[in-house]
Amino acid sequence: MTGILAFALVLAVAGGQAPADTTEILSAYGALTAGDEAPWLAGWTMSGRVWNLERAGADSSNRRTVLVFWATWCAPCKEGLRRLAVADESLEATGVEVVLVNLDAREPAVAGYLQDNPTPFVCVLDPFMQNTRRFFGLETGAGNSLILPRTVLLDRDRRIEAILGREGDDYLEILLR
């Protein structure tokens, strides 16, 4: 338990708020800046396989990869996932691969959520937030926060196109551009 606490980050979530009219598009967030190459990301999926960011570029039909950093306790995250699942066919048709990066420390919570709310997307587990810290440049310890959800759009070359914060009514439109 002490090890988990040592790796814990304070996560601030604006839960329960209705989506805004427009999605918050950030040119930079933490260590990420639009135009930079994305940091390495790898982890175990819910099906017990290893997934890494290089796989996203291996499929020649993928024009973009969308990484959605989320947690089961985050109300805005759940709404965003629901909207993504509804748009799955449109996303696939336009060459957009969606990968969910879950920050929950307990796999059973994720498994239970995904069983009740099926999604067609790969879900990579990040219980110690190693990928998340590398992506957003967060250090361990108090005083760090990550506002969820965070969506990172990557082009075919794994360059960051945009970082999305608050998911507005135009969220899916932005992902499908």
Image (tube, rainbow, N blue to C red):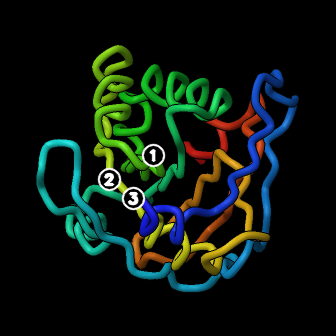
Label 2 to label 3: alpha-carbon separation:
7 Å
- Give the number of the mark in front: 2 or 3: 3
Q: Residue at x 44, y 70 (%)?
A: 131
The disc, 3 or 1, on the residue closer to the chain's N-terminal end is 1
Q: Residue at x 79, y 56 (%)?
A: 25
Q: Secondary structure at mark 1?
A: loop
Q: Is residue 119 left or right of residue 102?
A: left
- For label 1, the residue is 104
Neighbor class of circle 1 (other Cα within 10 Å; few <14, some 14-19, many 20+) is: some
The disc, 1 or 2, on the residue closer to the chain's N-terminal end is 1
* Dot label at residue 9: none
Q: Position of residue 23 (x, y in %)?
A: 79, 42
- For label 3, the residue is 126
Neighbor class of circle 2 (other Cα within 10 Å; few <14, some 14-19, many 20+) is: many
Q: Is residue 140 left or right of residue 109?
A: right
- Relative to 65, say whether 18 is above or below: above
| Residue 152 placement: quadrant | bottom right
Q: Amino acid at mark 2?
A: Val
Label 3 to label 1: alpha-carbon separation:
7 Å
- Relative to 45, say whether 31 is above or below: below
| Residue 116 placement: quadrant | top left
* Observer-nearest of 87 and 8: 8
| Residue 58 placement: quadrant | bottom left
Q: Residue at x 50, y 79 (%)?
A: 38
Number of numbered callouts drawn:
3
Label 1 to label 2: alpha-carbon separation:
11 Å
